[in-house]
Image (cartoon, rainbow, N blue to C red):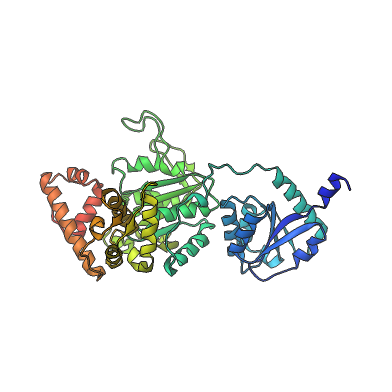
Amino acid sequence: MTKSAKQSCRPRYLLILELGQQITDIASELAHHNWHCLTATSVDCAMTLAKQYQIHVAIAQLTPTCQTQVFSTITRLKHAGHTMQWVAITSTPCNNTTKFRHSLPEYFIDYHHLPLDWHRLDHTLGHANGMAELMPSPGNGSITAATLPPLLGKGKLIRDLNAKIERVAYVDNTILLSGETGTGKGLCARWIHALSARHSGPMISVNCGALPPSLIHSALFGHEKGAFTGADQRYLGHIERAHKGTLFLDEIADLPIELQVNLLQFIEDCTIERIGGSQPIEVDCRIIFATHQNLETAIEEGRFREDLYHRINILRLHMPSLREYQEDIMLLANIILKECTPADAEFQFSPSAIQAMQAYDWPGNIREMKNRIQRAVVMSDTPRITESALGIAGHSKEYSGANLAEQRTVIDTEVLLRAIERNNHNISAAARELNISRTTFYRLVRKCHIDL
């Protein structure tokens, strides 16, 4: 037998994804066409097979009940670096759904519906396999979900959160992330972007509370040359730079209410106008909002538009506070300790430090934990991290949300009053001293019932 004949008889690997009810026996039929079929009935199984075998083409059996799982699995495989070409097998009722028609071009190169023409399917798979073999391997510099740090934790809350992230990532609706400061809303937004169909586009992150009030309109919407004094060239705003990607607006409650109507208009018609411009500019981006504040309370206090709230509160994910999944505290602490320990050193927590960490309320959540451990590693004279080095000695495990809120209000009130006094009641100067915007400063003043 010649070398070319041997190669033509070599089996080609084909991944068959069956996450729902099997709609046809593909493997046995395609085996007669020189395909070596590998069947996956779960996401983990598909990931394992993709790592073990050089698979260039795959089939996904789509039923109305498993479409979401299939799309999520394909997305995970793509972002893990597996560049196989996908073909869908579906029934006519499934094909008629709006979701399938919109998602088909994003996930599949072709689709076949029942009853199957096996010769036509074999031709499609063979062509896809040949084209996939010609494609270069993805570059090492590609930003994928595999390059992101994980959402740490093995408890039920984190498992449920990861499942929700995968579910909402492939749709294009706006998302609202809520949760306390330091819970990882920014990382969650990056995961959603990385798992979405927009992953190859830009992700633009904006902290609405950090933008100067006088420049926030220009920063978001951009301006034309000569629009105002100092505008010596055209500037593309954050929204326009997110075209074909994701726009992450953090601390959305700090956006001045007069600009909220402009943002609402953009969400409604997907167009903006730069300051000084006269032509509408279409922007195609997915928006993720985040806040640590209670937007319902902000609406009651007149700080947030109710119509904007209803427009952005379509898909909502809550980031749990660290005290809500205390079973993962030591898992997280040990991972963080390992990450910030120098290569030539070895640190571990003392038994009393472990007890103190499990008893501590962690009001600053993961961010606070990272900061305390990093500081302890730098400042410790011994390889054993103590509760004193962490700065949490003597803290009680008892927690009351109301009491903590009251304590924070007392602290905020004292800090604000001192800043106001030091700056002779100059609010702008006091806000600059505290490194917050005037909008945030006034919000805190109202919250603490301070009379200016």
Give the percent coordinates (x, y) of residue 82: 62, 51
Q: Nearer the viewer, residue 442 or 340?
A: 340
> Does 259 sit left or right of 419 as displayed?
right
- Image check: 15 left or right of 244? right
Which residue occupies the foreground of this view, 14 or 105? Answer: 14
Q: Residue 304: tell me if it is visible.
A: no
Residue visible at 29% across and 48% down? 378
Would you identify the image quadrant in which residue 154 lies?
Answer: bottom left
The residue positioned 27% from the left and 53% from the top of the image is: 382
Closer to the camera in the image, 449 or 184: 184
Q: Position of residue 254 (x, y in %)?
A: 30, 52
User: Which quadrant of the view contains residue 333?
Assistant: bottom left
Q: Is 69 left or right of 262, judged from the image as shown?
A: right
Q: Furthest-right residue in view?
A: 1
Question: Residue at the spot x=75%, y=58% of the render?
Answer: 36
Image height of 306 relative to 256, above or below: below
Q: Is residue 317 visible?
A: yes
Q: Is residue 126 above or below residue 41?
A: above
Q: Position of residue 272 (x, y in %)?
A: 44, 44
Q: Position of residue 24 (x, y in %)?
A: 74, 68
